[in-house]
Image (cartoon, grey):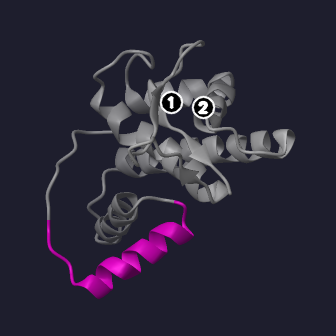
């Protein structure tokens, strides 16, 4: 993946609502949805570098595999443990193909901090798990999302939001 550019824009409420629906249907964030729509438009115009399309496919595949692993874990346990996201990432990380593809995607040490490419994909793992399972974020006593540090086995993620399925 090449360098990323951040920008902001205003959208009519109806367009935003539609993007949210498309994103939810595709188990992705609105940002990912917008990124894909723009990427398809640039590709259709013949201006998309081949490596960008490949990187988007890898991003989707890695995320989907984490969601698949979470779904399998929930089926095995018969419940959704709050730490299902790191469990799913650990299961994927144990797969040499997944781990190699992740390492190639971030173009660096999977366990190092500060890699901007990790900041792009890692939060998506929790999001796709949450969407796939129909989960919600666990809350603290103060009503904030319960964000926890990963402990034990080194993982490519360092923190996660605890989830629950009601």
Residue 139: give its label: none
Seen from the viewer's position, the closer of residues 149 and 29 is 149
**Up-down: is 164 above or below 1?**
below
Which of marks 2 and 1 precedes in the sequence?
2
Residue 158: x and y in percent read 44, 24
Task: Tell me if 78 is positioned left or right of 45 in this view.
Answer: right
Residue, x 37% and y 64% (percent of image)? 30
Say left or right for 124 vs 13: right
In percent of width and height, residue 155 lies at: 53, 20
Establish if 20 lies above or below 84.
below
User: Which element carries disc 2, helix, strand or loop?
Assistant: helix
Q: Residue furthest bottom?
A: 14
Decide whether the magenta segment is chiefly helix, strand or loop.
helix
Task: Measure the C-alpha gap from mark 1 to mark 2.
Answer: 11 Å
Tell which tag, 1 or 2, sits nearer the viewer. 2
Seen at 63% across and 57% down, the residue is: 132
The magenta segment is 9-27
Q: Which residue is mark 1?
A: 102
- Which residue is label 2 attached to? 89
Front residue of this view, candidates 7 and 145: 145
Residue 58, can we see it?
no
Picture quadrant where residue 70 is located:
top right
Picture coordinates of residue 38 (x, y %)? 30, 67
């Amino acid at each position: 993946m090449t360098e990323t550019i951040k920008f902001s824009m205003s959208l009519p409420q109806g367009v935003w609502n539609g993007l949210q629906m498309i994103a939810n249907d595709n188990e992705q964030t609105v940002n990912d949805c917008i990124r894909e729509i723009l990427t398809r438009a640039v590709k259709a115009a013949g201006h998309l570098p081949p490596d960008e399309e490949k990187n988007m496919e890898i991003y989707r595949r890695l995320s989907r595999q984490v969601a698949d692993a979470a779904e399998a874990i929930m089926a095995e346990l018969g419940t959704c443990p709050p730490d299902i996201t790191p469990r799913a990432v650990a299961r994927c990380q144990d797969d040499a193909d997944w781990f190699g593809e992740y390492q190639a995607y971030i173009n660096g040490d999977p366990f190092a901090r500060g890699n901007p490419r990790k900041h792009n994909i890692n939060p998506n793992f929790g999001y796709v798990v949450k969407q796939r399972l129909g989960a919600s974020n666990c809350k603290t006593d103060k009503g904030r999302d319960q964000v926890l540090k990963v402990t034990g086995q080194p993982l490519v993620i360092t923190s996660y939001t605890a989830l629950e399925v009601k």
